[in-house]
Each structure stands twice: as C-alpha cells, then as structure tokens.
Image: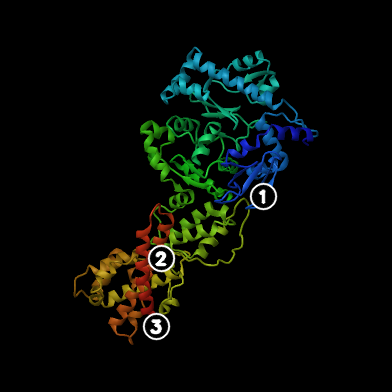
Amino acid sequence: MISAEDKERVRQETDFLQLVGETVELRRRGADWWGCCPFHHEKSPSFHINPSTGLWKCFGCGLGGDVFDYVMHREHLEFPDAIRFLADRAGIELVEERGARSGPKRNRLIACLTEAEQYYSLMLNRGRGRGPAQGRGYLSERGYNSAVCRRWGLGYAPGYGMLCAHLESKGFTREEMETADLAVMRNGRPADRFYDRVMFPIHDEQGRTIAFGGRVLTDAKPKYLNTKETPVFHKGKHLFGFDRAKEHIVARKMAIVCEGYTDVIALHEAGYPIAVAALGTSFSLDHVRSLARFAKVIICMFDGDAAGQRAADRAIQFLDKTEADLRCVVLPDGMDPAEYLAAHNPAELQPLLDNARPLMSFVIENRLANVGPSSPAGVRAAALDNLATVLAPLKDSYVFEAYALDVADRLGFDVGDVKRAIREKPVQGVTNVAEEPWSGHRSNGWEDDMPPVSAYESQAQPTVESGPLSHDERTQLQAECELLSLLATNPDLVKTSGDRIATFVWSDPRHEAMAWAMLATPIGASPHEVVQAAESVEPEAAQILSSGRVASSSDIRDEEKVRFVLDAVELYSIRRQIREIRAQMRNAPGDASELFQRATELQQRSNVLARRLSGSNN
C-alpha cells in the first residue's frame, strides 16, 4: 500500500501542465489552460486545467479529476499503478507500507545499469585487443562512426568478469548486479552476463538506462541476447529509442515501429527520428498505447519476410483498441530498414511512408494474393479459412462488420458466410461464438438486394469445387452453364453476340475457357464439333454442357432464349465487377472518382438488365 505521504510527494513533484502538454496543445485563458480533449475527438477546446487546484475537466465528454485520474485514463492504469508511474517519472522511490518490495532499490539498479553503459562504451572506444577491435569493425561496416556510437551509447562487453570487477570497485553489490541482470552467479562468484558482444543500451521514457541488448560477434547463439525481466525493465512495455523519438513523434504525430536496434539507429541517423523497436518480444498492446499517447499514425515497418508477415498478422488484433491509425510498410526485396537505407538515398523512403497501407488492408491483400472473386470456389474457401484465423481476434470488435464486408467483396462470398467463418475460429480457447444478426450494408447507393432472376434460383447448382457460394454466384454459375449449352446447341446464333460475351467476367474459369474454345470454331461448325472444342480445354465439359435447362425448352424461341441467358450472365457479371470496384474504392489511396464513375455506369446497366429480366419472368 502506498502511503499518503508518498502520494502527496509524487503530486508535488509532478508538473501537471508539462505532463499534459506532451500530448495536448494548451493555451492560457485567464487562470486556466485549455486544449482539445485527449480522450475524445473534438475541434473546439473543451478540456481545461486549473493549475492552482491541480484539477482538470472536459466539458465535452465529462471526464475530470486530478493528476492521478489523468494518468489512469491516459495510460490505462489502476490508481496505485498511476502513482507508481508518476513516481518513476519523477525519480521518486516509494516506500510502500505493506508488501514492500524486497531487494535492491530501483534507483540503485538504474545507477548500476548506467555505470555499466559507461563501462561498455569506454571498452568500445578505447579498449585494446581483438574483441574491441571486432566490435568497432562490426559497427563501422554498418556505417556507425564514433560519433554515432557515442550518441547512442553503444559499447562492447568483454566478459571474463571485467564488468563485475568494475562495478564492485564503484560500490555496487553482487545482489544489485544480479538483480539488474548484469551478472550471474557461478561457483559463488559473480560472472558477467554479457561477453564478446556489441552492446545496445535500452533507456526508459526519461532516458535512464534500464537494460541492454547484446549482438554476438561470432557464430555463437543466440545472435542477440537481451536483458531479462527485472524490476526496472519489462520487455512488453518498453521500446528501444522511445526516449529519443518521443519529442519528434509528438511534433509529427507519427511513429515508425521496426524490428531491430540497428533499424532504429539507421532511421534516426537518416533523418527519420520517429522510429522505435520492440525489445525481444512481439509488438504489444502496451507498446501501441504508449505510442498512441503521442502519435495519430503508427507505421509498422516489418521486415519483408515470413516473420514480418507474422508480425503484421499479430498487430491487427490491436486495431479496435486504439484510436491511432495503424499502417504498414514492407520494404522492397525483403530488405530491413537498415539494409534499405544503406542501399538507397534516405529521401527515397519518404514516398513509401506517405503511401503506407492500412494495416488490415495489407494483411488481407497478402493473405488473398492471387485469389479473387473469379478464382475457383475451393481456392477461395481455403483462402477464407486461412484469413479467418488471423481475423478471429476481432470477431467481437466494432470493426468486425466492415472487415467482413471487405473480405466478402474480395472473395465474392455472402458477408454472412464470411462472418460465420471468422466467428467459428477459436481465439485463446474461445470457440463457436454465436453470430449476431447483421443489419445490412449500403455503399454509395449500390444495392446488394437487386432483383433476382427467378428462373434460375431453384436450379442454380455450382459446378466448381464446393465452397460457401453466394446466391449471386450460384445463379451466375447456372446462367453460365445455360449459355454454354445454348452455344453447343445453337453455335451460330450465339456467336453473333461474341463481342458482348467478351466483356463478361466469368464466375468459373473453366466456363470461360470453354466459351472461348467454342466461339473459336468456324461458322457452320456442327454442335458435335463445338462440344469437342470445349472438351479439348475442359475434361468435364460434357457434364457442364448437359446441365442447361433453357436450351431444352421447346416453348421459347431460340432468339429469346439466347437474349434471356445473355442478359442473365451479363447482369451477374456486372454485379461481380461492382463488388470488385467497391473493394478497390475502400482501399484506394487518394481520388477514387474514376472508380466511382465506372461503378455508377455499371449499376445503371445492371438496373436495365434486371428490369428486362424481371419482365421476361412475368
């Protein structure tokens, strides 16, 4: 339990205006300071602080309180942790009345780690022998001269108990060294935790040394060795370079998250001082929340390999837990940021940042690469199953509906089937979450419930691999079969509409291949020859061609049959195109007016065809 005295001491040592000013632009009006509330979106300032009382209030959202309430809201902390947060920020060592922490004090651990950083730096810059020389060579190869090494406090760990001996000479105890993870006990004596490694010091938000990352200079494993969890260091909360990047992130309202120490240093030195990196762990919700205090846009610059893709997949679970805009950049040729900047002019990186993709769009597009509404149903069903595993953490999120609709448009499935596939995927032991009714979706006036072609509804049967086909797709598949059957029975009559058929977007690629083979037969070719042409490109052509029902009807003129079926295939082909354009518009950067115009033209044509077909059915 934290004493009342400690609580008041923390309050007195905290500059409330400075704390709020890190994320809110404040302007003085009389005795109070005003700004836009950091806890809800507003254009006119309704958030104010009274320095004399130490209280704040937002007249927009109703939140208010003292400095501890502010930190609780901003940092998502409970009350005791809010006090500890501010105490740590002010360098105050709390004396908790009950359950007091055992072991060395925090300030002693930080002092021990700071002394270790200075020692490692001295060994890198002035050390003699093979080890320090290799360390300097390694950093020089990456473009880090002595000035860069000094700016970032880079060092070299020689091992052999040399650090422990140095720290003991400075008055630090073995318990302090071991608790800070600078030493391990061997045969009753302290031994250096790091040896023969280039050292990257890790600082907290206030710039104090709290941990290290060591890069081996030989083939030994692991390649990187990081400080384990200690009383002053928590991997899931701290970010490498955050202390240096914070002011720049505040100014630009943007942060870059990458995967390695060298990436962060390379970005800062190249003129991008808004970069940070996670520390020996996945990008976490705490990381997102730390950055979202200062940044409106968080760009994840993951490596362009499988590990980078997995990191992007994991990061999407935070989309609904922050107001920050999460985006993604993957550098070309699988390069990491340090490699890219070594091979390119730093200015070439800016257009990539400017065109960073929304994180969800990046993940969906990568997962659905080479798969679209025209792909075989089995392929699309497998792609949906794969993507559902990634999207499952968002199944109960307010963003779920929008992403399910996007996936449905991209794959040509009913949105209900897509939602069901995602909801049924387990997340951390949770399975079979019941689906809630969906209220429907309308975009720019394009209707999903266009009039059906009732003549095909009961007969519509898919002729491709099984999958969760939409009503439109099942109907289009049957209409395509009807058209192919007519082409087989009345080839010359259908061929007169060859130019129109060439504009169709087919549901089944097998149907499209058959159609082109049949249309390529010469005028006057017999139905048998036309069927043979179809069989030359599709082994199951006979089964497909025999499924047509309209061709066998004797009470309709052949010309009317052809017109009816052509209208039906074109109608559902247009609906497919509209869905694809809608998906493009949702993710298109910049002006999408051309896409909108194209969709409007297609919708008008679709309405004409739907009315014509509806009249044919009456």
Q: Quadrant of residue 502?
A: bottom left
Image quadrant occupied by the C terminus: bottom left
As drawn, the label of residue 617 is 3
Q: How far apart are the alpha carbons under marks 1 and 3?
A: 61 Å
Q: Which residue is mark 2?
A: 464
Q: Earlier in the sequence, mark 2 or mark 3?
A: 2
Mark in the foreground, 2 or 3:
3
Mark in the foreground, 2 or 1:
1
Q: On screen, 169 above or below 264?
A: above
SS under mark 1: loop
User: Measured from the top left, where is residue 564 in percent x and y?
Assistant: 33, 78
SS under mark 2: loop
**Amino acid type of the residue tagged 2 in the rendering:** Val
> Does residue 153 show up?
yes
Q: Which residue is mark 1?
A: 63
> Does residue 547 show up?
no
**Amino acid type of the residue tagged 3 in the rendering:** Asn
User: Measured from the top left, where is residue 506 in percent x and y?
Assistant: 35, 66
Q: How far apart are the alpha carbons under marks 2 and 1?
A: 57 Å
Disc 2 + disc 1, Cβ < 8 Å: no
As drawn, the label of residue 112 is none
**Amino acid type of the residue tagged 1 in the rendering:** Leu
